[in-house]
Image: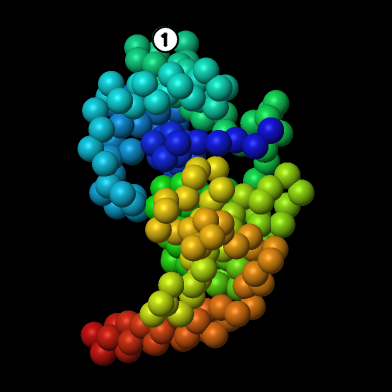
Amino acid sequence: MKIHLSADEARVIGALIEKEITTPDQYPLSLNALTNACNQKSNRDPVVDWDERQVQQLLDALAKRALAVDRSGFGSRVPKYRHLFCNTAFGQLKFSAHELAVVCELLLRGPQTPGELRSRAARMAPFTDVTQVEQVLEALATREDGPFVVRLPREPGRRESRYAQTFTDLPAEHETPEGAVLPQAEAPIAGDRLGGIEERLSLLEMEVAELKRRLGE
């Protein structure tokens, strides 16, 4: 059965996944640590300012649906929480490391381009180039148990289309006039190759400039 999350539940799940990957020695998270993770000003859109009571209510709602659980170890003085969203022993939803990094970023920051996903998800699963991100997006969009991402109509002035996860409802501004988004399977990513090449060229120019600066020093 497809998992559906509210925008606030997505923030909690995304924060738990992110910290599980990036700070495994501090995972599971205490309520205080999870609240701080949800309220982070970096890599979050929108930025929120929740208190522990609000986060606890979201955890309780997720626990009732078997999507989060208290996993305090023996002797632990405070409850610690982990997600059961995916990649668990008994759950059916499984993602590769790269798929999970992309899904996590989309849960935390909303719709993004392949180039944005490449740079932002690198701390969880490094991507060699934008083409690899596009391949992961295509896999997520065409899985038999999905789709887990959709491609949004390209916005005026943008070189690349953005992609969104399908676990939450899309805000109205990301819908087409008919009220539906375009699934990846029906909208090939090849049309964004030029934008991806331009973005990679820009990154290379920045790297060359940095190397020149270091040589000069």
Q: Position of residue 95 (x, y in %)?
A: 65, 46
Q: Is residue 96 visible?
A: no
| Quadrant (top left, top right, bottom left, bottom right) of the C terminus | bottom left
40 over 206 or under it: above or below:
above
The residue drawn where x is 65% and y is 69% is 187
The residue drawn where x is 49% and y is 45% is 169
Nearer the observer, 49 or 181 = 181
User: What residue did someone put label 1 on?
Assistant: 75
Q: Please rate how many residues cluster around mark 1, counting C-alpha atoms within 10 Å: few if below 14, some from 14 to 19, many from 20.
A: few
Q: Is residue 116 left or right of residue 36?
A: right
| Quadrant (top left, top right, bottom left, bottom right) of the N terminus | top right
Q: Position of residue 2 (x, y in %)?
A: 65, 37
The residue drawn where x is 26% and y is 41% is 48
The residue drawn where x is 29% and y is 52% is 42
Task: Name the kind of residue labelled 1 in the image.
Answer: Gly
88 over 193 or under it: above or below:
above
Q: Secondary structure at mark 1?
A: loop
Q: Is residue 108 visible?
A: yes
Q: How many marks?
A: 1
